Amino acid sequence: MGPLSEAATAQLRELAPRVLGVLVRRHGDFADCEDAVQEALLAAATQWPATGPPANPTGWLITAASRRLVETWRSDSARRHRENRYAVGTHPPGPVSAVDDTLTMYFLCCHRSLTASSQVALTLRALGGLTTAEIARALLVPEATVAQRISRAKARIRESGATFRPPTPAERQERLPAVLHVLYLVFNEGYLASSGPRLHRVELTTEAIRLARQLHARLADEGEVAGLLALMLLTDARRPARTRPDGALVPLADQDRGRWNRDAIEEGVALITATLPRATPGPYQVQAAIAAVHDEAPTAADTDWPQILALYEVLAALAPGPMVTLNRIVALAMVEGPAAGLAELDAAQADPGLAGHYRTSVVRAHLLDELGRPEEAREHYLRAARRTLSQPERAYLIAQAGRR
C-alpha cells in the first residue's frame, strides 16, 4: 500500500472544513465533531491508497465521521440519549449542501469565548490542516503550549454552547482579525513549508487564496481583507521561480523574474493601490505594499530599498514582532550597509523569538559574508542548516557554507 497521492491529500484538506461544518450543523458538539473528522481523515489516508478514492469522497468522510461520533457517544453512558437521536442507521447522512461552509467554520473557531491565541491555534488545527508542530513553529511557541491551547479551546466552545451559524455583523467584525491571521499563517506554511522535502505546499496557498477571495467578495470595503488578498497574490506570484527543476531553493535576488506570474502581480498591485488611499492602514496592507515594491522592480538591483525600509518602519509600529524586526534589519542593511545591519541584529538578539531562530543565523551569515568575514559566515550558515526542518532550505544553506 503506497502513500496517499498529493492530489488526494489536497482533496482531503479541502473537504475537512466542509465535513466538519456538516457534522457541527447536525450534531452541535464542535469538540466531538472535530475529533470525529480527524479520525475520518486518518481512515481515508489509510484506506484510500489501497481501495482507491470513493465515488463520493465527501459522503464517505461524513459517514465515517458520523460513525465515529456514535462510537464516542456509546462509550459515554450519560450521552446514550443522543445515540438514539443521531445513530447513523436511524438518521443516514443524506444529501450534502452545495454551500461552502468553510468561512463560517473559521468564524465559529474564532469564538469570543476564546483568547486570540487559542482562536488561532484551534482554527489552524481544525480547519487549516496544520499539525500541532507546524502551528508551534508558525506561532514561535512550544508544541506543548499549542496542544494545551487547542484542548482548552475545544472545551470552551463546548461550554459556551456555540452553534453553527453565520456570524452576525458584530461578531464578524469582532472575529475578523483572528480569521485573517489564521489565513495568513496557512498561506505562509504553504509558501515556505516549515519542514519536509518540499519548499512549497501548494494545496495550502491555494486554499488560503481561495478563502481570502471569498472573504473579500463579502467584505470588499475592509482594507485589511483586501490587503491580505493582495499580499497573497503578490507573494505567490514568485513561486514559479523559487525552485530549480531539482527542487533546490532560489533566493529572491537570483530568481528569473520572467517566470513570475504577471497576472497575479497586476491583480495584487491593482488591489493594494485601490485600497491604500481609502482604508485605515493595517499590517497586511503594508506587507502587500512591500511585496508590490519587490514585484515591480525589473531586477533585484532596481529594488527601491529605501521605500521598503520606510514601509518596515511603519509595519514595526503597527505590528511589532520578531520576523518584522528581522526583515527590517535586512532592509536597513541594504540601505545603510551590512555593518549597520549587523549592529541592529546584535541589539535585537535579546528578543527570545529571534535568539534561537534559524533565520536569525541566516541573516547574520549573509551580513558577515558581505563584510568579508567568510569563516564566521560559514559557521552561521551551518548553524542555520542544523536548525531548519525544511530540506530544501537546509540544502541551500549547506551549499552556501560550502562556498565560503
Image (tube, rainbow, N blue to C red):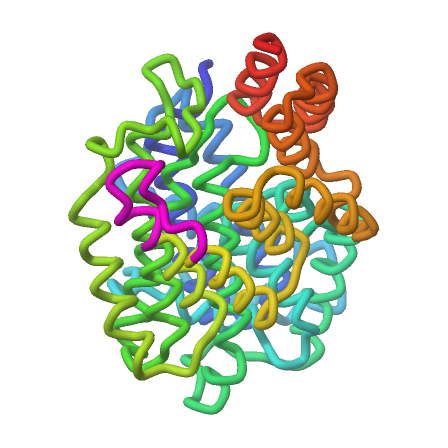
Could you say which is closer to the camera, residue 124 or residue 248?
248
Q: How many marks?
A: 0
The residue closer to the viewer here, 62 or 176, is 176
Residue 81, x across and y down, in percent: 64, 71
As for residue 301 lying within the magenta part, the answer is yes
The residue sitting at 70% across, 66% down in the picture is 153
**Quarter of the picture holding the C terminus:** top right
Percent x, y of residue 221: 30, 82
Seen from this angle, which residue lies furthest bottom? 170
User: Image point 51% across, 35% down: which residue?
Assistant: 193
- Residue 147 in picture, x, y percent from top left: 74, 51
Q: Residue furthest top?
A: 402
What residue appears at the point 27 percent right and 28 percent down from the top-left corner?
A: 256
The image quarter containing residue 339 is: top right
Q: Answer whether residue 58 is visible to the viewer in this image.
A: no
Q: Reply yes or no: does residue 342 show up in magenta.
A: no
Q: Is residue 254 above or below residue 265?
A: above
Secondary structure predominantly adopted by residues drawn in magenta:
helix
Spot occupied by residue 357 in the image (x, y as percentages of width and height)? 72, 39
Q: Which residues are magenta?
A: 292-306
Tell me which residue sits at (16%, 48%) in the image: 263
Q: Quadrant of residue 376?
A: top right
- Whether residue 298 is situated above or below residue 318 in the rendered picture: above
Figure quadrant of residue 370: top right
Q: Is residue 313 visible?
A: yes
- 371 or 34: nearer the viewer: 371
The front one of 316 and 184 is: 316
